[in-house]
């Protein structure tokens, strides 16, 4: 087990749901840990961030590891569909870059705009994974807004799974998996 149980669970869920033929998007590249993990599971990873620091750090890591099937994209996750035509899954690890500028964080409006543009493009069997942090103000707003958006999804088409640490102090992160189980009408 890794030090962060929720991140460990998030990776276990990715392993269970992604195969070697899949194309997957990391919507929030950050320091590249999730991107590199994804690259070990699938055929191709497209990874996005709006900070040069994230691109530089992840680019350095994938070169060092000689990983060739990762494409780094310096753009907001709101524009995923402008860069990638098909994908099995999109993952979001929300919030700000660890050890980076805490003012550059994900935001409720743009995260929801991305989710709503991704869902119709997912194949049946595809999914979005979100790791959500409520220990900072924007994260709290984002968490509430995402849950209220998901509450209105068609439940025959999308099944949402939540994994959390209900009895722990200090606002631990939690996971939402949005599985597409049927085509939209
Ligand atoms: C918690 S970090 C991600 C950690 C990362 N998955 C890793 O393995 O290191 C969140 C990242 O989201 C990025 N971000 C914020 N808004 C974004 C947006 N609209 N589009 C893409 N990335 C964004 C931030 O710059 C930050 O690097």
Image: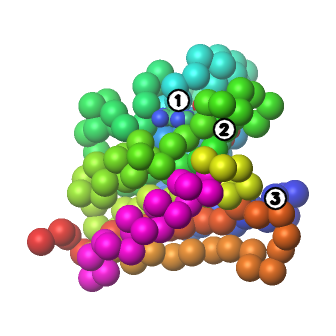
Q: Which of pointers 1 and 2 lies earlier in the amino acid sequence?
A: 1
Image coords of residue 81 (percent x, y): 28, 38
Q: Give yes or no for contact between labels 3 and 2 (Cβ–Cβ under 8 Å).
A: no
Image coords of residue 134 (percent x, y): 67, 58
What's the mark number on residue 134? none
From the viewer's perspective, is 99 left or right of 89? right
Residue under numbered circle 2: 96
**Is the residue marked 3 within 8 Å of ligand 1, measured from its CB?**
no
**Is the residue marked 2 within 8 Å of ligand 1, measured from its CB?**
yes
Magenta highlight: main SS: helix
User: Which residue is most to the left?
Assistant: 185
Q: Secondary structure at mark 3?
A: loop
From the viewer's perspective, is 87 left or right of 97? left
| Residue 139 visible in image | yes
Q: CA distance from mark 1 to mark 2?
A: 11 Å
- Asked whether 6 falls inside the magenta stretch, the response is no
Q: Which residues are magenta?
A: 139-156
From the viewer's perspective, is 6 left or right of 67? right
Is 171 situated above or below 166? above
Image coords of residue 87 (percent x, y): 34, 48
| Mark 3 neighbour class, 10 Å CA radius: few under 14, some 14 to 19, many 20 or more | few
| Mark 1 neighbour class, 10 Å CA radius: few under 14, some 14 to 19, many 20 or more | many
Q: Which of pointers 1 and 3 lies earlier in the amino acid sequence?
A: 3
**Is the residue marked 1 within 8 Å of ligand 1, measured from its CB?**
yes
Q: Secondary structure at mark 1?
A: strand
Residue under numbered circle 3: 4
Q: Give yes or no for contact between labels 1 and 2 (Cβ–Cβ under 8 Å).
A: no
For the point 42% across and 68% down, the residue is 148
- Asked whether 143 falls inside the magenta stretch, the response is yes
Is 71 situated above or below 18? above
Q: Give yes or no for contact between labels 1 and 3 (Cβ–Cβ under 8 Å).
A: no
């Amino acid at each position: 087990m890794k030090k962060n149980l929720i991140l460990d669970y998030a990776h276990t869920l990715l392993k269970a749901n992604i195969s070697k033929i899949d194309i997957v998007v990391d919507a929030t590249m950050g320091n590249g840990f999730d991107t590199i993990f994804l690259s070990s599971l699938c055929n191709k990873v497209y990874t996005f961030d709006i900070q040069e620091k994230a691109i530089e750090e992840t680019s350095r890591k994938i070169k060092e590891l000689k990983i060739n099937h990762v494409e780094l994209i310096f753009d907001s996750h709101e524009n995923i569909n402008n860069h990638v035509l098909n994908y099995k899954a999109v993952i979001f690890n929300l919030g700000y870059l660890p050890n980076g500028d805490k003012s550059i964080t994900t935001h409720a409006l743009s995260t929801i705009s991305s989710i709503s543009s991704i869902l119709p493009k997912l194949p049946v069997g595809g999914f979005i994974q979100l790791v959500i942090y409520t220990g900072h103000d924007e994260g709290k707003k984002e968490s509430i807004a995402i849950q209220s958006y998901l509450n209105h999804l068609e439940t025959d088409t999308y099944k949402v799974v939540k994994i959390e640490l209900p009895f722990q102090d200090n606002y631990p992160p939690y996971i939402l998996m949005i599985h597409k189980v049927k085509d939209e009408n």
